[in-house]
Image: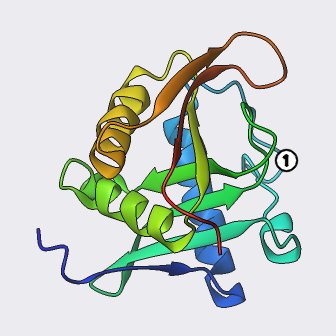
Amino acid sequence: MSLRNLEVRQATPADRLALFRMLELYQHDLSDLWDQELDAHGEYGYSLDRYWKDQNCFPFVALLNGHYAGFSLVDGETKVASAGRWMDQFFVLKKHRRAGIGRAIAFKVFEALPGYWEVGQMSNNLPAQSFWRKVIAQHTRSTYTEHTLTSGWWQGVVQCFDNGTQT
């Protein structure tokens, strides 16, 4: 699969419905790890409002050959440091996994927002931990730190790195 036709861009209001629907797929994929219930509409639900209202939130969509292939949601709610970027949610459609698309999306998002980053994974999500360790090691030439958070409202493994000055 060619990555030449991969476009990663900040989402617009026109992408909102597609992003919401991909979030439903994402939450379904994690339903064995993330204790959630469907609401009265049969949806997991995820509020995207802050991604269009908060200047520290950045929704990204990825399109391959003009079709949605995944997304990334970034905010400023870091878990280790007092400021920076947090990879809040990240998703690649199943049909595009294991083809380098996830790595390409991550690199493009990191490059779009240079500065201090934290990328976290739930403690029991071992595939995500493996993915992010490889991607971040490649992106940073292995210059990152890793922390395990065992207390507080968010717990899991967090990789931290700085890829340049925030603009």
Q: Is residue 35 above or below residue 82?
A: above
* Farthest-out residue, top: 150
- Residue at the image position 39 percent from the left and 37 percent from the top: 143
Q: Which residue is mark 1?
A: 40
Front residue of 145 and 99: 145
Front residue of 158 and 69: 158
- Picture quarter with the C terminus: bottom right
- Residue at the image position 79 percent from the left and 54 percent from the top: 41
* Farthest-out residue, front: 165
Quadrant of residue 126 in the image? top left
Label 1 CA crowd tier, 10 Å (few <14, some 14–19, many 20+):
few
Q: Is residue 69 above or below residue 35?
A: below
Q: Is residue 82 above or below residue 108?
A: above
Q: Amino acid at mark 1?
A: Ala
| Residue 83 position in % (x across, y down) | 78, 48
| Residue 74 position in % (x across, y down) | 65, 58
